[in-house]
Amino acid sequence: MEQNLRKYETMAQEEDYEIIAGVDEAGRGPLAGPVVAAAVILTNDVNIDGIDDSKKISPIKREELFPKIQK
């Protein structure tokens, strides 16, 4: 995972938060159409190469990552 993606997780862990969800959304916004949002909680020992902002990942790469994230 990109180090920058863990910035806020690290800050929360330093304040003793134990469960931290990563959240992302896709869509044009409530004024222009539907929006889909999702949250995922991974344990600290999980490191999946390629995870980044969904808008920076190709549709093919997202399909590859999906089963790894679910596992």
Image (cartoon, rainbow, N blue to C red):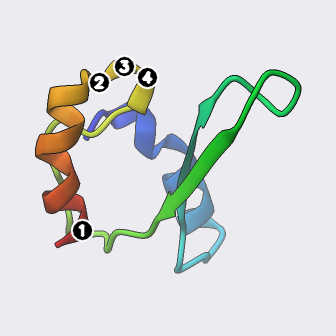
The residue singled out by tag 3 in the image is 56
- 64 lies above or below 58: below
- Which quarter of the figure is the N terminus placed in? top left
C-alpha distance separating marks 1 and 4: 19 Å
Dot 1: what SS?
A: helix
Residue at 24% in and 68% down: 70
Percent from the top left, x then y, of residue 7?
Answer: 50, 41
Percent from the top left, x then y, of residue 40?
Answer: 44, 64
The residue singled out by tag 4 in the image is 55
Q: Amino acid at mark 2?
A: Ile
**Disc 3 vs disc 2: Cβ atoms closer than 8 Å?**
yes
Dot 4: what SS?
A: helix
Q: Amino acid at mark 4?
A: Lys
**Disc 4 vs disc 3: Cβ atoms closer than 8 Å?**
yes
The residue singled out by tag 1 in the image is 70
**Disc 3 vs disc 1: Cβ atoms closer than 8 Å?**
no
Foreground residue, 7 or 1?
1
Tag on residue 52? Answer: none
The residue singled out by tag 2 in the image is 57
Residue at 70% in and 37% down: 34
Residue at 27% in and 40% down: 51
Q: Amino acid at mark 3?
A: Lys
